[in-house]
Structure formats: C-alpha cells, structure tokens
Amino acid sequence: MKNTATLLITCPDAKGIVASIADFLYQHNANILHADQHQDAENNLFLMRVEWDLTSFNLDVAAFGQSFAPIAAKFNMEWQLKLSQHKTRVAIMVSQYDHCLADLLHRHKSGELACEIPVVISNHRDTEALVKFYGIDFHYIPITKENKSDAEATQFGLFDSYDIDLIVLARYMQILSPDFVARYPQKIINIHHSFLPAFIGARPYHRAFERGVKLIGATSHYVTEVLDEGPIIEQDIDRISHRDQVEDLIQKGRDLERIVLSKAVRWHIENRILLYANKTVIFD
Amino acid sequence: MKNTATLLITCPDAKGIVASIADFLYQHNANILHADQHQDAENNLFLMRVEWDLTSFNLDVAAFGQSFAPIAAKFNMEWQLKLSQHKTRVAIMVSQYDHCLADLLHRHKSGELACEIPVVISNHRDTEALVKFYGIDFHYIPITKENKSDAEATQFGLFDSYDIDLIVLARYMQILSPDFVARYPQKIINIHHSFLPAFIGARPYHRAFERGVKLIGATSHYVTEVLDEGPIIEQDIDRISHRDQVEDLIQKGRDLERIVLSKAVRWHIENRILLYANKTVIFD
Amino acid sequence: MKNTATLLITCPDAKGIVASIADFLYQHNANILHADQHQDAENNLFLMRVEWDLTSFNLDVAAFGQSFAPIAAKFNMEWQLKLSQHKTRVAIMVSQYDHCLADLLHRHKSGELACEIPVVISNHRDTEALVKFYGIDFHYIPITKENKSDAEATQFGLFDSYDIDLIVLARYMQILSPDFVARYPQKIINIHHSFLPAFIGARPYHRAFERGVKLIGATSHYVTEVLDEGPIIEQDIDRISHRDQVEDLIQKGRDLERIVLSKAVRWHIENRILLYANKTVIFD
Amino acid sequence: MKNTATLLITCPDAKGIVASIADFLYQHNANILHADQHQDAENNLFLMRVEWDLTSFNLDVAAFGQSFAPIAAKFNMEWQLKLSQHKTRVAIMVSQYDHCLADLLHRHKSGELACEIPVVISNHRDTEALVKFYGIDFHYIPITKENKSDAEATQFGLFDSYDIDLIVLARYMQILSPDFVARYPQKIINIHHSFLPAFIGARPYHRAFERGVKLIGATSHYVTEVLDEGPIIEQDIDRISHRDQVEDLIQKGRDLERIVLSKAVRWHIENRILLYANKTVIFD
C-alpha cells in the first residue's frame, strides 16, 4: 500500500523557494515521486504540490511542521501536509437522481477513488437499496421549509460522528443554508448541470434547449456562499443538435455529470487542488 | 459544375406532407440527391431540405412556384428555392484582427466555400494588402461616433452595388445600428469569442480567465436586434488549464473562431440552415 | 407507453422510392414521427428509417408485409419492421471487469435502455452479486481450452431459452468460436478498448502507451468472423499526456468504454443502425 | 522583447537533482519563470524544463556550461541551453496542398510563432505567390526518380546557406531518403493525415472511409528512418458520420492538420519537447 506525503504550498513568488524546499526534502532523504508548481505572474503567487515516498524519509512526520517552520516563515507560506495513509472520509448527499451516486459508489468499489465513503444522506428513500448494496450507511433526512434548520443540524451531527472531511453533493436538490456553507469551507463539492457561468440556477437543460445552444455542459465546483459562483474544478461538454429534445439533453448530460463530478472528487482526495482568487489549480 | 436546386420548407406538421413533396418531385423527374427533414413536436412544426439534380428535371424552374403553389397552399408552407448556379455573394466586414478573414479567404480560394466574395469592408487599413492579394476589392470606411450613420449609409450603398446576399462579421469590432440589423434579417453572421450565453458582450476571454473556467468557446450566430442573442449556428470549445494566461486563451480562441465562423458561412451558402423559435436547424 | 412501428429499408437508389413509401404510409393514415434517409452515391444505395405512431394506423400490422410487398418488390428492397411493443431481449456476457456491466444495468434500470435484460453470463463469479442486485439471472459458465465447445453449447441453450435477440460482450475476455459468430449475425456487439483499426488484438492500452500516442480510444462494433474487423458502431477518444501511466490509460479508457458501448446498445435496440459494405449508418 | 534562457535536462532519476539545479539557479540569481519536470518510473528517468529571465542572471551565459558541468557530471545529464534571443530558423517544405503552409505563414506573421521562416522549398510552383506575399524566399526544386539525390543535395545546400534549425514538412508529398533523415535528427517535423498508428502510409482518408471509422485524425511527429513511426508530438480527431464522403473527410481533415502541425512547430521552437523511448514529453 502506498505510503506517501503530499505537501501543498501557496506563497508570494520569490527567488529561492524551490531551492529551499528541494534542499529540505533532500536533506531528509525524501524520494520525490511527483512535483509540480505554478507561478501566477498577475497575482505574484507561487503554488506547488510535491509528493514523496515516506519509506526512506528520515524525519518524524509529526515533527515535520517544526522542521519546516523556518522555510515556511521565510517565504510566508500557507502549507498543508497530507498523508496517503489517512484516507479522506467522504459523505455523499443525494436526492432522487441516482446516476452520480451509482457512479461514485462503483468507482470507489473498483479502487478508482482512494477514500472512505462511510455514509450517504438523502432527503428521499429512492437510493437506499443501492447504498446498502455497497455496504454503506444510509440516513434519510427529509427536508421541508419548516424543518430545514433542524435537518441541517442533524446532518452536522452525522458529519461529526462519521468524522467527515469532504461533502459531495451528487445531485442533491436542496440549497444549503449560509451556515452550512460557512462550516465547511472548500469541503463541499457540487455538480451543476450546465457549462457555468451559462445557465446559473434552476433547470439549466430546459434553458439550454430554449436558447438553442449547440453544446451542453456540466461543471463541478466548490460550494461558496453565492449560488453556482464557487471555484470551478472541472467542466466538460457534449454536442447536441436540433434532433435532441430536452429529454435527450438530460440523458446526454448525465454522462457529463458523472465524469465531471468524479474527476473533482478524485482530484480533491488525491490533494491535487489548490485555490486562489476563486479559481482552482489542478496538479494532475 | 454542380447544377442543383434546393428546396427549404417550414410548415405546421401534418400527415401527407412528405408524400406530397416526394410525389411532386417524382412527377417532374427530379433526381433527389439529399433529403433531410425535422419534426419539432413541441412547436408542431415540419422542416425539410431537399436537393435534386436539375439535369433531368422536366419543370421549367422559373415556373416552379406556379406548379408548387397548390401544395404550398394546402400545407401552409413557407418555402424557398435556391439554385446552385446562383452563388451567394458575400461581403466580409473586419477590423484589425485578421485571422478569421485570412481563413475565409484561403478556404474560398481552395474551393471549400462555394460563394463569391467580391468585397471586404474595414474600419482599418491593416488587412488591405491581404485582401488585394486574393484579388478582392477593399473599402476602407473609418467609423467615429460622429460619422457612424453616414458610414453605414456608405456600407449599404456598397452592399447594393455589389449585390450582396450575406454579410459576414469576421471580428468586426463595431456594433451595428438597429437600422443596419433590420435591413438584413438572417443575412448577417457574426462570430462571438465565447460560449454563448456565457460572457455576452465585451472582453469575453478576460472574463473567462477571471471566472476560472476550464473550457473556452466560440459561437457563430445570426445578428438580431439584441446583442449576442441571435440564433446560434455553431459552437465549439477548447480545454484550458491554470497554465494558460489571457494571451493563451486569446490564441487558442482564434482557432475556435476560425472553425466556428467558417462552418456557419459554409452552411449558410449551401442552404443548410432553417430558423424557427430563435434557433437553427442545420441540415448537414 | 410508446406504440410505434419502425421500418428499415435498404435498396438500390432509384427515382420514386420516397414518394412510394410516403404515399403508402399516408394512405394507411400513419402519423410519421421521425424519418431519415441516406443515399450512398458510390454504392448506388438508398437507406431509410421511418418511425410512425400506430394509434391511427389503419393497417393490421400482421398484414403489413402483404400490403407493402408490391413496393418492396418494385424497388428490390430489403426491409424490416420493428414494433416498439416488442422489446429487444439482451444477454450480457462479461468476465471480471465489471464497469461496462454496471453501467448498462444502471442505465437499464433508469429507463435509458428500452430493452429487456433477462440474463447475464460470465466465466467468473465476480459480478454475480451485482447482477442479482438488479434482479437479473446470472449464469456462471467457466471456460477452459477443453470445455470451450461444450460451454458455448450451454450458452446457445440459454440464448434459446431466454429468447435472446442481442448479445452484448461487455468486456468478455474470451474469443468466440466461428460457429458462435456465424449463429448470430449482426446480433453480437463488442467493445474494444482502442481506437480501431489502431491496436487490433490484445493489450491495446499497453501498446498505446508504448507507442506514445496522445489520445486513447474505444470502439463498439458488431462481431464478425475476423477479430476486431466488424462494422464500427461508435468510437470516442480521450486526451492523455506523458503524465499518464498505463494504469491511467486503463482508468480513462473505462469511461470511454462505458459510453461507447452503451450508445451502441441503445442505437441497436432503437433500430437506428443499418449495415452495408461493412459499415454502419446510424439514424440518430 | 523576451530575454530568457531555457534549460532542458534528461538524466537517470536520483535524489537531489531538483535541489542541485534549483540551488545553482538561485546562487546565480536567476528569476525562474516556468519550471516543469517529469519522472518516468518505468524507465527510471528524470526530465526537466526550466526557463528563467536573464536580466538579473549573474552568470555569463557563455560560461554557463563550465559552471554547470559538475552538476551535469554528477547526475549524468544530457542537457541543452536555449536562448530566446536566438530564434529557431525554420525551412518549410510543401507540395501542392497549401492549407498547412498558409496557416503557418499567417500564424508567423501574427506573432504566434516566435521563429524565423527565411525559406520555403517546393517541388511545385503552386505556392510561390503566397510565399512571396509573406516576403519569404521560395525555391522550386522539382523531384523525379532520376534527380532525387541531386535535388536533396540542393536542399541540403539551402539548409546550410539559410542556417536552418528545423525543417517542417507541411504536406510535402515526397519520401525523404535515409540520408536526408539521418542528417537532421529530431529536426524534421511531419504532419500525417491520420490518427497514427491507424492508416500508416498512403491515402489514409480513403482507407478511413472504407473502414467506416466514426472519427478521423491527424498526427504531427518527428521524422525517423521508419515511415510514420517517429515520436508523436500531437494528435487530434474530428467526428464524421455516414453523411460524410471522402471529400468531406479530406476537408474536415485539413482543419485537424493545420492545428496539429502548428502546435508541434510552436512547441518545438519554444523548446517544450523532450524525447525518450521514441516518445515525446511536452512541457506546456
């Protein structure tokens, strides 16, 4: 089983950053597996992802922070260290459309998604049998105007008790409260069934059909306080023609949604995503 | 040289339409080369394109209308008859970016676009040498706030004297007056450098960059009175990443613009486009 | 529930075919829903698909053949009449990779595939639980060099008893005998994990990796006597880079395989495919 | 004007490479603009591209080799240093199809290709006017079975006198002699009008049409001694249907060829391509 550490860094660009990091890792006998970096000239930012094998690493990982602190301080870095042995714990939220859910569960079982999925939460019972087939806990939490706040409190309790790191909205057809969104910054991934920023909001396939576009799209993004305005993680499109009715758009869209959402989840749990200026950098 | 007729029909859907048209063409010994039709259930519309070789057609084309009138009346058809021997006469309007212009001129010379291009009009002199290299008349008509109305009047005069059927805006960076648009309904094709309806208006690549989209697009459409809201003819996209700066978006976009605009022009001059409900049907 | 008839026709091209068919359908009060046709100039062939609502059709469908016979004879047609009320009965064959199987079963349950899937046959037990979850019979038929002929005989028996119309090889890693292939002409669909005709045969992803291609593909096709040479139904590709190892190609390929195979199955069961000259015409 | 140095490195993978290079550049006050690296686990190779601004670089570039020699020796590096102030000098060879040529010349004039194009060589006179319009020397060198060796000698002489760094075969329909190929290793880029390795050799569009593929492609690659087997630089595809005849494939293919060839040329002249194991790494 893979035993690696991944270091994610964001800081103002400056001379000597790479030299410092590379030297630090070399001094501690790290066997670097992947390194990727990005410099954003406009914002004068330096972003880096480096992953190394821990087998020969001579630094106690618990003490990493202390040893790395002088470098981090010198370059004013924001940094995170992720260990492959700690698998991200994912909660999936879903309503009635189950295509994204079924896709994620199958990918997870196939080993494509290196995370834990201990729980699925739904405001409908439609997906219960499927979830249980995969041996995952299912919680039915219906949502009404009246109970929304209580329902979310119940959800928060579940996230706590299952020790959840990431919430995936796999066609969850409820708008989260500002409080919900604020509690889990950069920890909620949504799939929107249009090529954002086109067709923000409800019924995007119907509006795409009415506008007569020649391509439909899907967008996965982090959820922020403004609807459909969070940092975009991935997008894809498919071609349509006048022969396609709304139902055909919906059907073609399902394939886009599956692929676009699953890529976002995979990149997140593999620690490949860095955020800045409401954008994502994907170190694939 | 090709000698065909193309009949384009739009009418309410009803039983017997195809039988009537097919029988009419058969009675007059038409050798059908291509036939395509579309039924829009929602709007109860029938749309058809049929092209036949005129060699053995036993009806005087001038008299076609008279012979076809009873069928057209019975089904309440709007119809147009186009002859391949009459080539569409195209005026291209351009400002300083010449990539779409150079592309159209080269395609035309290569035989890919079966039209005449007698004239190019520009509010700059940058493209004059290129246009003249291809043996095409070039008219320089500068535009200012003050002279806009006069400049358009001059343009209308040129369209008349060159007997223009289609106006192609190949990155012409001026907004046409309502009067201009109204004079040439479904006769003006524009290229917009975004995936409409995302990023309507100015500087779409800059806004795409700021929003952090993962795909950029281009859209060719007929010009109507509302900016960037006319019927979409073709769209395409290309993938970008965090490594792409605005300049890269602009460069990648040029390839999209060339292809998306040239397809729209080709489909128009080959009489493959029918309009309804602010949408296009492309009979390719 | 939909109650339509679909007529598929192939014949030498000639004047009057469309008029004859359209007139025949009009005389019998057919409400045409979709009609599409193709003329292949090189082979002088005419191909057509027409689908109509049976509600108002005044001809006893059982007697259709008799009434249509004079037209069919006049134009030397090969024709088939398919009724939407008879759903295609599909057997899926699979080995250990279950991604295409899981995808087909989920699409079927979602209503995307208007067929019956009464049985899945496998030479491994890996997929048994999944198949039974969807309420479908599972038959385990191991294959060895020695028992291959007997195993196929057992399979033929199952196809008979389940009244199978179409066999889908959803990553079934066994080569069918010539006898098997000959028994089910144009009734076996396979998914090949390359962009045919590149990388015919075994281990295409490994060979694609070695060759250093920049795109990988998948191809669905009818199975004929020559390996991977049958008529191609659908193909798609995805982009790869030097960062992708063989495992990444395999993972990306799974998404292609799912989509390309499911489209082929859908088009087949919706009677949208006509064959000629070892090619397919897809009336989508 | 840009004033940068680009260092390209290939060596066996080992700990400390990045630290050594980064430290070296930091010591000499390099302002790193872009850095990208790739580790090929299977072949135990490390590949890197790093580009820095020369403004503040405190090392005399002429002396770079001497200073860098100990690091290069320690890690057994193959390395090249490229200066942006030396623009690659490109000769284009072309026959009668001029779409790739016209595209390259227009991109060059637009500033998209940061190279010099002092000369175009053709075995036909068709493109002479176009080449001269862009102010470039044109040499007509007809090829026959008898004169091939002499003709190539003349070409070699031109490459010498124009001080050519890169030869681009922009639909040059002659097979180069082994001697020609051997003289210019990794210095000849060709465009092949298929998705290699499908349809190696002549008339790929005709063979794609006969096989009934659903996608056509184009491939740019370095020319090596075995026809169409050199390292692939870029590939792309477009979708076709039964409605497309061979002429349509050829037309659609032209757009692919233009884009795929121009990307290869751009990446080469921007020093973004490294070769190993008959494959390319593209540092884009």
Image: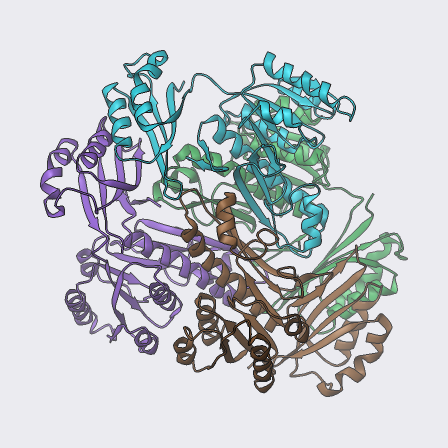
Chain colours: A cyan, B brown, C green, D purple
Depicted D93 relative to depicted B64: above or below: above
**D132 displayed left or right of A174:** left
Quarter placement of the N terminus of chain C? top right
Percent from the top left, x then y, of residue C143? 53, 27
Question: Where, by quadrant of the figure, is residue C131 drawn?
Answer: top right
Quarter placement of the C terminus of chain C? bottom right
Specify whether residue A41 is in view.
yes
For this rendering, which residue is in front, B4 or C75?
Answer: B4
Q: Residue at x 28, y 74 (%)?
A: D135
Percent from the top left, x then y, of residue D158? 18, 69
Specify whether residue B88 is in view.
no
For this rendering, which residue is in front, A24 or D251?
Answer: A24
Question: Where, by quadrant of the figure, is residue A271 drawn?
Answer: top left
Q: Residue at x 67, y 50 (%)?
A: A208
Question: Where, by quadrant of the figure, is residue A155 drawn?
Answer: top right
Q: Residue at x 51, y 26 (%)?
A: A113
Percent from the top left, x then y, of residue C163? 73, 37
**D221 displayed left or right of D204:** left
**C270 displayed left or right of A100:** right
Percent from the top left, x then y, of residue C220? 56, 45
